[in-house]
Image (cartoon, rainbow, N blue to C red):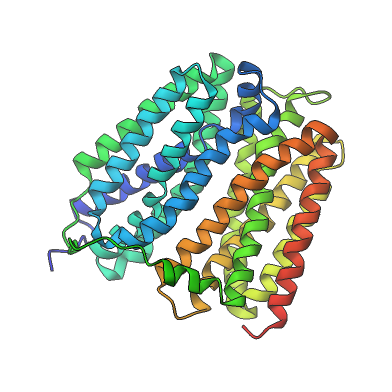
Amino acid sequence: MARLIDKGTREYTCALIMMFFGSLAAFGAEYCLQPVIPILAQDFNLTPTQASLSMSFGTIGMAFSMLLIASISKHLERKKVMVIALGISSILILLMSITEEFALILALRFVQGILLAGFPSLAVAYINEEFNPKIIGAAIGVYVAATPLGGLVGRILISTLTDVASWRMGLMIAGILYLLSAIMMWIFLPPSLNKKIEHGKIKIQWKDFLSLLQNKKIIMIYLIAFCVMGCFVCTYNFISYVLMAEPYNLSQTIIGFIFVLYLVGSVSSAVMGTLSDHYGHGIIIVISVIIQLVGILLTLFMPLIVKIIGLAIFTYGFFGVHSNACAWAPQSCQNDKAQVSAMYMLFYYIGASTFGTIGGTFLSNYGWSGIVVFETVILTIGLILAIILYKKKE
């Protein structure tokens, strides 16, 4: 085995910095269009449902790419694939900033989603293979810390530049910064030396994936993820429409800062994850879905501060469910852990793509209250599944 990256070395510093900025860029690219969905609707003369496809096409690309990545990861050289995926994704953002056809933006987003799907799994694999086992926890902690920050910083950057110039300028500058991150990773990230790449025939284990759907416990966890992620993306896709309109009239920049509430998710993941060690995943998921329900119902009230508090509570509940569900799924069967996690992410992103778009119809016809009623029904279904799951032995 080649030399491992150890604390105090130049390789350690370079690897941590590059993984941090790579994560910032990858997750910033994933959510680059979410804060400007209402602006896209204006520029391309779209309904909220149509405009939200700019997010849904990216997440649906990620969803189906997950199964492929889980099957072929052993054939991939970690650093090279991460850099290429991030670099091409950045170029696609630059192309989005100059295209005059919304259909082309959707096509670019779909390809971008396929590329970005592999970054998280390959990044974690790189850290586990290249770092000294004694410091892997700290290294992954740095990477994970950049995950919500990437989406947050990207949204704020693009929202602010949209106010100052235009959404096209926002995308262009973001694309350039993300491309620079990819180039820096190529130059400074230590090469992958401890993973033997398999060169045999690539084969997707469809039977193994399908066998997961015969496990009732696993499928219920997947369906809960489908429900809560769908509602989460639906909320943040369309809340901008409400906040930009009367009586709030918030600027695009201020709306970008609404996504600071994502940091509540970091607290929730840590707190609810710790509680699950003592009380089990089942009860924590039930409580978290209830918290998410309470949060979305609070957004019905008109005062802005109550709406923001509702969003914070909603966000806290979502991350409580997600952190526990994604940890519980691989523990619930004997299948390959990568396949279990990949199928989880498939349901997770299909939920985002489906409800993140359908919600636009409710917004157009019934306003924000229509979205709240829609999500209340979906979350109630998720809660019923969570209660049934809790009553079964973990």
Q: Which quarter of the rendering shows the C terminus?
A: bottom right
Q: Is residue 132 left or right of residue 325?
A: left
Q: Is residue 89 left or right of residue 329?
A: left
**For this rendering, which residue is in front, 380 or 274?**
380
**Quarter residue 39 falls in:** top right
Give above or below for 375 relative to 308.
below
Q: Is residue 3 left or right of residue 283?
A: left
Whether residue 305 is visible: yes
**For this rendering, which residue is in front, 239 or 47?**
47
Counting every numbered tag in the picture gives 0
Q: Which quarter of the rendering shows the N terminus?
A: bottom left
Q: Is residue 220 left or right of residue 75?
A: right
Give above or below for 122 relative to 48.
below
**Residue at 58% across, 61% down:** 269
Q: Position of residue 258 (x, y in %)?
A: 65, 36
Q: Position of residue 322 (x, y in %)?
A: 59, 61
**Residue at 31% across, 63% down:** 203
From this viewpoint, which residue is outermost toward the left? 2
Q: Position of residue 111 (x, y in %)?
A: 41, 38
Give above or below for 339 relative to 229.
below
**For this rendering, which residue is in front, 139 or 360?**
360
**Residue at 26% across, 41% down:** 185
From this viewpoint, which residue is outermost toward the top? 165
Q: Position of residue 270 (x, y in %)?
A: 56, 63
From this viewpoint, which residue is outermost toward the front? 207
**Residue at 30% across, 37% down:** 182
Whether residue 14 is visible: no
